[in-house]
Amino acid sequence: MTIIEEIQDSFPIFSEKEKQIATYLLQNNNEIKNINISDLAKLTNTSPATITRFAKKIGCKSFVELKIHLNASMIEIPKDDHNQKADQIYDFYSKVIKNTQRMTKIDQIKKVVTLIEKADRVLVFGAGSSGLTATELTYRLLRMGLNASAITDPHFMIISSSIATKKDLVIGISTTGETTEVLNAMKLAKKAHAKIVSLTSFSKSSISQLSNVSLVSYSSKFIDNKRFINSQFATLYIIDIITTLLLEKDEYRHNMEHTIDVITKSLEDE
């Protein structure tokens, strides 16, 4: 695990001051090379002592060692000389994908694929933008012939999870891992002995701790949270891997191709 992954994993349990330091380091890790502890304290509105404690909390003996680890795990993205907006967004997405790829554990993804194949029903929970991602995943599963439902209304989440069974699989999507509606529904589903999978950015979050399997992707807030850019991009990358592995099964691939043919024919008949 790189120092960047360690900081993201530990983010939910940091104090507020430590979160300020963590956020700055993850958003500006390319600039840490030439910064000293006093300057970082000013930039994060903390103190050198707080930064030293932060470094020790994530396994470094000092701020200097923290800088060394950050520089070693830094991802360099080539910059366009004209620095056009399109290039900036490309850089953003490249960083998200590269960091998520580095964090991805294919054995865990394969476990999720197996759980989906064995489930009588797949219930996918998500709120806000995560609800849109839940709907996208559900559409893909339905087109493979799987019994799947996207549930984005808080009341429907509670109803569905309260009558879940041990043969059901509940997938909860929450970037923070602390979305109240999703968390409460997943707790109910776990009491009903359903299998639980989470897609989140924090392995130590409440949702992740509830899960039989938790798939962790890189949080886009640690690259830039000032722009209106898709916060679900990393989660969709994980979903792409899941659905690609599912489509290796002939039955699912045939069903997907059949739905494409049916949709295409219906459009031609209009």
Image (cartoon, rainbow, N blue to C red):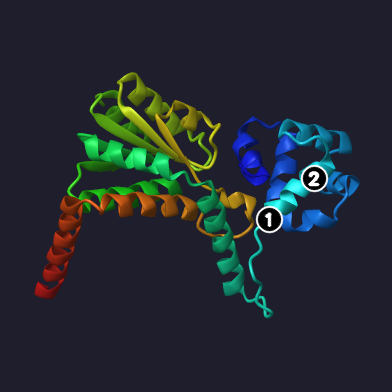
Q: Secondary structure at mark 1?
A: loop
Residue linked to disc 2:
44
The nearer-to-camera label among 1 and 2 is: 1
* Rendered-image quadrant of the C terminus: bottom left
Q: Tell me where residue 122 appears, x and y as whole percent.
A: 26, 38
* Rendered-image quadrant of the N terminus: top right
- The label on residue 201 is none
73 with respect to 65 (left or right): left
Q: Tell me where residue 5 appears, x and y as whole percent.
A: 61, 43
Crowd rating for badge 2 (residues with CA inside 10 Å; few <14, some 14–19, many 20+): some
* Amino acid found under the numbered disc labelled 2: Thr
* Amino acid found under the numbered disc labelled 1: Met
- Residue at left 42%, top 50%? 238
- Residue at left 82%, top 38%? 51
- The residue furthest right is 38
Crowd rating for badge 1 (residues with CA inside 10 Å; few <14, some 14–19, many 20+): some
Residue linked to disc 1:
74
Can residue 128 be seen here? The reply is: no
Query: Taking 189 as reference, is 112 above or below it?
Result: below
- The residue furthest bottom is 82
Q: Tell me where residue 255 appears, x and y as whole percent.
A: 16, 55
Query: Taking 61 as reference, is 41 above or below it?
Result: below
